[in-house]
Amino acid sequence: MSTSTRHQTAIEADPELPIVRITRDFDATPDQLLRAHTDPELFARWVGPDSIGTRIEHWDARTGGSWRYTATRDGEDIAGFFGAFHEVRPDRIVQTFAYDGAPDSVALETLWFEELGQGRTRLHAQSLVDSMAGRDAFLASGMEVGVNEGYATLDALLPELP
């Protein structure tokens, strides 16, 4: 369940390229954010909108690994997502992201963690999709709600992490 947050999420569509950029500050270290994105149990606790659960089916968060999870609502499967981890290192994750309903539309996502000092980190995320229409569909999918609610939930979980 998300809580109110003092940090705002910026979601921007590049006007010239099929790219969506997300920027968000967290009261956390880069190590804590990396763990939240690579530990399957933690990831399942915060990702997506509050109304949707996450069941991890496969998770191998290492360079060359892959992942798959299913979004659920009221015990019913509603959507499947999958991808590959192309690079996982302490300051950066590069992965693909695909949705079962559109398996030919694969996004290349790059996340990097900018240490701001005093236990704060800025998360940068960039998703490159296959077309401007794909980018617009990505934005129209409700992803903004999922990103904002998910990050608010992550804010509440981060103090639990060493």
Image: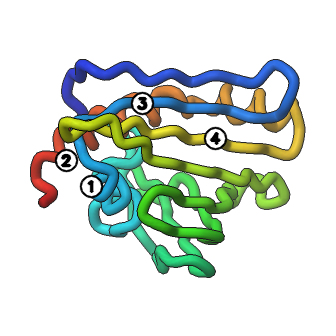
Which residue type carries mark 3?
A: Arg
* Number of numbered discs: 4
Residue at the image position 61 percent from the left and 65 percent from the top? 82
Vertical side of 15 occupied by 43: above or below: below
Q: Cβ–Cβ below 8 Å for labels 3 and 4? A: no
Which residue type carries mark 2?
A: Leu
Residue annotated with mark 3: 24
Instruction: State which quadrant residue 80 falls in.
Output: bottom right
Q: Earlier in the sequence, mark 2 or mark 4?
A: 4
Q: In the rendering, at what x and y percent does residue 127 appear?
A: 68, 43
Query: Which of the labelled discs sits on residue 126, or is there none?
Result: 4
Q: Is 119 in front, or is 15?
A: 119
Query: Which of the labelled discs sits on residue 158, or is there none?
Result: 2
| Secondary structure beneath label 2 | helix
Mark 3 vs mark 1, CA separation in Å? 14 Å
Q: Cβ–Cβ below 8 Å for labels 2 and 1? A: yes
Q: Earlier in the sequence, mark 3 or mark 4?
A: 3
Q: Is residue 18 left or right of residue 51?
A: right
Query: Which of the labelled discs sits on residue 66, or is there none?
Result: none
| Secondary structure beneath label 3 | strand
Pointer 3 local density, CA inside 10 Å: few below 14, some 14–19, many at least 20: some
Query: Which of the labelled discs sits on residue 32, or is there none?
Result: 1
Discs 2/1, front: 1
Q: In the rendering, at what x and y percent does residue 12 appear?
A: 63, 22
Instruction: State which quadrant residue 100 falls in.
Output: bottom right
